[in-house]
Image (cartoon, rainbow, N blue to C red):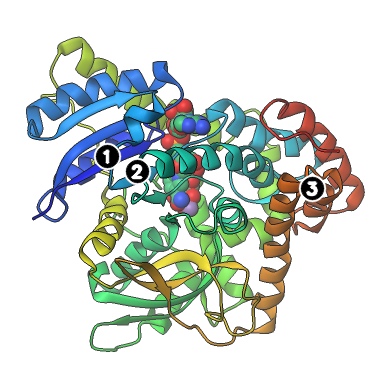
Amino acid sequence: MKKFSVVIAGGGSTFTPGIIMMMLDNLERFPLKKLKLYDNDGDRQGILGEALEILLKEQAPEIEFSYTTDPEVAFSDVDFCMAHIRVGKYAMREKDEKVPLRHGVFGQETCGPGGIAYGMRSITGMLEIIDYMEKYSPDCWMLNYSNPAAIVAEACRVMRPESKVLNICDMPVGTLRRMSQIIGKAPEELEVRYFGLNHFGWWTSVKDTEGHEYIDQIRNYVSEHGYLTQIEVDTQHTDPSWQETHKKAKDILAVTPDYLPNTYLKYYLYPDYVFEHMKDHPEFTRANEVMQGREKTVFDHAQQIIAKGTAEGIAFDIDAHATFIVDLARAIAFNTHERMVMIVENNGAIANFPDDAMVEVPCIVGTDGPEALTQGKIPAFQQAMMFQQVTVEKLVVEAYVENSYQKMWQALTLSKTVPSAQVAKELLDDLIIENAGTWPELH
Ligand code: NAD
Ligand code: G6P
Ligand code: MN
């Protein structure tokens, strides 16, 4: 079998070790020749790089491993770039979550004003790594996890329409794993129909390979417990705040009982509830929970490996749900035509939705990339919500391209999470100060 060369952009990410452990676990399905880490923060990446170098020498010495901050070294001679950068790192995620609170609005990584602020930062970093990839490995595919995926995907559609960038999210896969537990089936046996935007969608069907429909059974469960399941299905979405989110799916389902909701809809359907919860501990948001949790654990493990000079007995968790990335890389490399939920240009996949919207739908993926499966017409409620939200995402990208204060103000005003144009303006002025140097100048 052919062996592949992969660069991970955002090598210093808290998810890097988990993804590498997952790839080591899947070498029979996706053999690796070279594995490189790339980050623009050499110190942060260096800790993970040094530890992973020790680990890989012990567990997979045949893979050529390296880490670098030099784009030419990183992006030359690679088949796939797995990207998960966070422009501004955790310091800025904290601001995305905390600045809106001053204005009576919740703050979140990808939704509402926090997501809009992050989007404005992310576009620059994403365009930079896409351009490096195309310069040094023109045939390479980028499998991009970097958030906010909806805004990043729209920015790619507008500014890099020919680039081989696939934007993906692990939430549909992660939630499907929960559903598979609810009905006692393996996730690989399930096929879904789904429509929406990133972090903004609904499942309309969950069937097994024989065509048996499980949506009623799952709905009954979710209407009582949300997506909380007995056994945890991954290591990522287990902290108290995530448990709360899985549970809240019960109330989201109550609004649109026909379809199973993505948990992120809680930010749009229950923004007041989210704000009330955050208001009680404005100094401790999800960013703090991650910094004290996942980030600390991952970097502590790395430091221990470096100190001992061996990874024996110091395990990084395997990021099991991220097998999605290997499945996707395989689909492209081996033309498997596997079915996966991805973020793509609509072009009729959702019949009563604009062609030029970046939507999240099931696709068949092969060597030429994804082909969207048609999901038919969607109900007015979802269509209206999605149209409002996709327009927010488009306005952010237009604001970026045109350096337009006006469009950014409109984007915040239109967001279902912001109560008025007045609040949007005050929030925008605050965000401009807090994001100084990381946003394009707006005027
Ligand atoms: P992190 O801050 O730990 O890691 C991000 C890394 O990116 C940092 O080491 C940082 O130095 C680096 N970076 C920032 N800007 C860069 C640039 N221009 N070029 C190269 N490197 C750059 O963040 P994390 O919590 O591990 O998350 C990483 C990313 O993955 C985030 O964007 C997060 O939202 C995303 N994510 C997405 C999904 C999804 O469903 N799509 C799932 C999980 C994580
Ligand atoms: C899910 C979403 C990602 C998001 C992540 C945040 O996996 O699909 O888009 O980045 O959650 O998780 P965290 O643990 O960093 O809050
Ligand atoms: Mn996501």
Find numbered disc 2 in the image and state the secondary structure of the residue it sits on: loop
Q: Are marks 2 and 1 in contact (CB under 8 Å)?
A: yes
| Residue 152 visible within the image | yes
Label 3 crowd bin: few (<14), some (14–19), many (20+), radius 10 Å:
many
Across and down, in percent, residue 6 comes to 27, 42
Q: From the viewer's perspective, is residue 385 above or below residue 44?
A: below
Kindly identify the amino acid type of the residue bearing the numbered disc 2: Ser
Find numbered disc 3 in the image and state the secondary structure of the residue it sits on: helix
Q: Which residue is mark 1?
A: 77
Q: Which mark is residue 259?
A: none
Q: Is residue 51 left or right of residue 203?
A: left
Placement of the C terminus among the 4 image quadrants: top right
Q: Which mark is residue 408?
A: 3
Placement of the N terminus among the 4 image quadrants: bottom left
Which residue occupies the foreground of this view, 17 or 138? 138
- Please name the residue shown 28% across and 62% down the image: 332
Kindly identify the amino acid type of the residue bearing the numbered disc 3: Met
Q: Indicate which disc, 2 or 3, sits on the residue closer to the N terminus.
A: 2
Of circles 2 and 3, the one toward us is 2
Label 2 crowd bin: few (<14), some (14–19), many (20+), radius 10 Å:
some
Q: Which residue is mark 2?
A: 137
